[in-house]
Amino acid sequence: MVELREYKHLGLSLFVSDELFLPNPTTNRIAKAIDHSDLEGKIVFDIGTGVGPLAIWAAKNGARHVYGVDTNSEQIDMAKVNAKYNNVQEKTDFYVGSLFDPLNSMKADTIIGDVSTLTDIAGRVLGYYPERVEVGGPDGTRNIIQLLLAAPCYLNEGGTLYFPFTPDLADGEKTMRAAEETFRNIEHLQPIKFELKEDDIIALKAAYNGNLPAFMSKVGILNEYNRYVWHGEVIKASRPF
């Protein structure tokens, strides 16, 4: 069912559906991490736009034009509705496709790479990704590494890339290695923390037949507040090789 929800951290009201990917704390942290000088008067690509929260937020916060891309056509249809509802339809375009494919030879000053960085199993079991929405592959790196390797070809000189990093629920070492081999500058910005219930831990372990992958070694460990959490952060990458 489609409903209108308010997202105060973004300053937006958006039409969303539980059958599609919902804006979450990672969405908020990415918006908080982005330097407004990387938006003001700039061309922005929002890869993995979902229903358009970050694309619309960027358009309302000074971007000259924003191009959003997502593999899910239902999400792109919703993004267009949300752009019109938030009066930024003239500053946004949305395309169905994989990563940068629909953008051809276009280039951006800023790329927001909010693609899935969780494993398929974790994304489904923890309820972050509905069945119709693509996740990040067996080790969570499929989409983000493809994006990291391709991004330099779509960045104007001096451009920047922002992306989420989720080492607790994906192969973070593999992702960071790709980032460091592609960009000279890697800045660790906003931390992300998601609380997990004990039932989440039990379900996740059961989905992996009792043996979590080595890169998930921190999942299931209680923090100083006696809560289960998984950690991530927002990364800013610039100056590609």
Image (tube, rainbow, N blue to C red):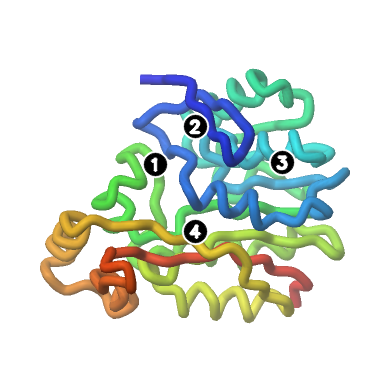
Report, in whole angstroms, how far the alpha carbon at label 3 lies from the one at label 1.
23 Å
Q: Which of marks 4 and 1 is nearer the N terminus?
A: 1
Say which element carries label 4: helix
Please tell me the numbered disc located at residue 58.
3
The residue singled out by tag 4 in the image is: 143
Mark 3, Cα crowd under 10 Å, few <14 / some 14-19 / many 20+, is: many
Report, in whole angstroms, how far the alpha carbon at label 4 lies from the one at label 3.
22 Å
Image coordinates for residue 134, horizontal then vertical, percent: 40, 47
Quarter of the image that includes the C terminus: bottom right
Residue type (three-letter) at the residue carrying disc 1: Val
Say which element carries label 3: helix
Q: Which of marks 1 and 2 is nearer the N terminus?
A: 2
Mark 2, Cα crowd under 10 Å, few <14 / some 14-19 / many 20+, is: many
Image coordinates for residue 187, horizontal then vertical, percent: 67, 73
147 or 39: nearer the viewer: 39
Query: Depth-wise, is mark 3 or mark 1 nearer the camera?
Result: 3
Report, in whole angstroms, how far the alpha carbon at label 4 lies from the one at label 2.
17 Å
66 or 232: nearer the viewer: 232
Residue type (three-letter) at the residue carrying disc 3: Ala
Say which element carries label 2: helix
The residue singled out by tag 1 in the image is: 133
The residue singled out by tag 2 in the image is: 75
Q: Is 129 drawn above or below residue 11 in the view shown?
A: below
Q: Is 196 drawn above or below residue 235 in the view shown?
A: above
Image coordinates for residue 110, horizontal then vertical, percent: 75, 54
Q: Earlier in the sequence, mark 4 or mark 3?
A: 3
Report, in whole angstroms, how far the alpha carbon at label 1 lies from the one at label 2.
9 Å
